[in-house]
Amino acid sequence: MDQIKEIVMSWRAMDIINIASEDEDVIKSLIKLLGEGDATIRLRALTAIGELIKNTDGKVKSEVLKMGLDRLLDLLRDSDGRIVSRALEVLSKLLEGMVINDQRLLALINASIPLAERGDTFVYLSLLELFRGLQVPSPSERVREIIDDLLSSNNLYVRGLGMRLLLSSGGLDGNEKTAMECAVGLLTSDNALLMETGLNFLEETIEFHPTPRVVRHLPGIINVLEDIENDARSSLLRSRASKLRDKVEKILLSYYRSRREEALEAIRKLLVEGRVEEALNLTLILGGKSLLNESRAGKRIA
């Protein structure tokens, strides 16, 4: 333990990697150092563990996961922001591409919620990146309940965490409306990084989950994207919003082109709900004035 502490304090990371390949107790010693009172020792131990994970085989990853996950999650509550950021980096390396069990996933979510609630955008983006690398192919009923709770939160950052988990779970599972509302909330925020996150979520949704339920919510997205195109200060955001709007319009055209009656019904519903601009957008994408006249006639008959 003292030898490992000395190596950590001297920043000899490669020595740690070489020793760890021959002595499994090195990992245990590093994890114990994460509980040191000295923030510098905690930070350097984190760095050493990160290098160890990056430069060794899967067995080391498994050992760190088994012995150190709880301690790493505790560090997400650390008062030192440097340690929180480094802990997120290490967790991302550790969990990337892994399928973790429910117990560990729930522990990770519970440790992440207070972090999201802080509203520190840069830390938040690292947190979303961590969950993006996870594989959650078959979430349990309990995990789904937590995702639903996150998506219904009044805190935009927490809702975004729920959206990330939902997308990582492989399907929107009846939460299409809530998911799209979350994306709109991010897109209409005043924070450029959150807006970019909203664009990422929307792009991932239409690329991997272009289900009929998702398509039905897309007309409401067009005006939001147009506002970003016209008003965003960042040229990158304006460009991305323009390209994404084109994709949305192509998806709407592709879906409704062979479903005229469904298209008419969608336009009628938007008109009945007073969403006239969305109805006009969908009409223009699909065929113009004649389609709108038909939908209005149907509305009067109804």
Image (cartoon, helix red, strand yellow):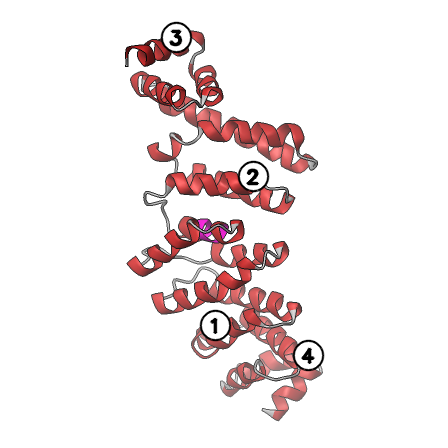
For marks 2 and 1, give the one nearer the viewer. 2
Q: How crowded is mark 4: few (under 14 residues within 10 Å), some or many (20 or more)?
A: some
Give, as a single range, the part of the protein colored magenta.
Answer: 160-164
- Vertical arrangement, residue 37 with respect to residue 123, above or below: below
For marks 2 and 4, give the one nearer the viewer. 2
- The first of marks 1 and 3 along the sequence is 1
Q: How crowded is mark 2: few (under 14 residues within 10 Å), some or many (20 or more)?
A: many
* Between 105 and 13, the one nearer to me in the picture: 105
Mark drawn on residue 293: 3
Question: Disc 1 and disc 3: Cα gap in Å?
Answer: 62 Å
* Dot 4 amino acid type: Thr
Residue farthest bottom in this picture: 2
Which residue matches tag 4? 40
The location of residue 295, given as percent across then percent down, is: 36, 13
Is 207 colored magenta in this rendering? no
State yes or no: discs 1 and 3 in contact (Cβ < 8 Å). no
State yes or no: discs 2 and 4 in contact (Cβ < 8 Å). no
Local secondary structure at mark 2: helix
For marks 4 and 3, give the one nearer the viewer. 3
Which residue matches tag 1? 61
Q: Is the magenta stretch mostly helix, strand or loop?
A: helix
Question: Disc 2 and disc 4: Cα gap in Å?
Answer: 38 Å
Which residue matches tag 2? 187
The location of residue 188, given as percent across then percent down, is: 57, 38
Left or right for 116, reference 142: right
The location of residue 288, given as percent across then percent down, is: 45, 11
